[in-house]
Amino acid sequence: MTKDHRTLTNPPTLHDPTPFGYSHAVSAPGELVLIGGQYASDATGAVVPGPFDEQVELAFDHLLSALRGVGLGYENVVRLGTFIVDHDLDKLQVLGKALQSRFGDRLPAQTLSGVASLALPGMLFEVDAVAVRG
């Protein structure tokens, strides 16, 4: 049996993701920390209904909580994966403003995927991240 060298972190400021089949953050030996998909959720993991811009703001707030749970911040993020339901240019502008307000001119690499739907009904946006320590 191999030893598991991963450290799983599920900050108490976020819902328990394990019933949904994931952890909020996984640290492996070395510098990389992987942050699972964050979305507009309440303390139980249910989607907080609302317009796209509000869901984006709440998802990024949760991303910061997950990062802080492992002692990191936005400045440690090197890559984002973003997922937008029914992507269009208006939503891209909302996302761009959210990124600028958090990362300024130090934007991480990003892949944006326009999708038909996400994991739960009512989810309009999701973001995951790769961060580095140091």
Image (cartoon, rainbow, N blue to C red):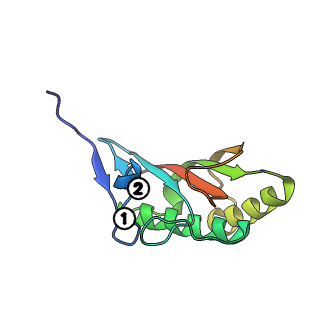
Q: Which residue is mark 2?
A: 24
Q: Residue furthest right?
A: 89
Question: Pointer 1: what residue?
Answer: 69
Give the amino acid type for the residue marked by disc 2 in the picture: His
Instruction: Relative to 87, say whether 56 is above or below.
Output: below
Q: List x then y, in percent, for residue 16.
A: 36, 62
Marks 1/2 in contact by CB < 8 Å: the verdict is yes
Helix, strand or loop for disc 2: loop
Near mark 2 (Cα within 10 A), the count class, few <14, some 14-19 or many ≥20, is many
Which one is in front in this view, the residue at disc 1 or the one at disc 2? 2
Residue 134 visible (yes or no): no
The part of the image, by quadrant, that contains residue 60 is: bottom right
Residue that appears at 56% across and 55% down: 120
Label 1, label 2: how many angstroms apart (C-alpha)? 9 Å
The circle on residue 96 is none
The quadrant in which the N terminus is found is top left
Classify 70 as above or below 30: below
Comparing 116 with 40, the one in front is: 116
Three-letter code for the amino acid on which mark 1 is drawn = Gly
Mark 1 lies on a secondary structure that is: helix
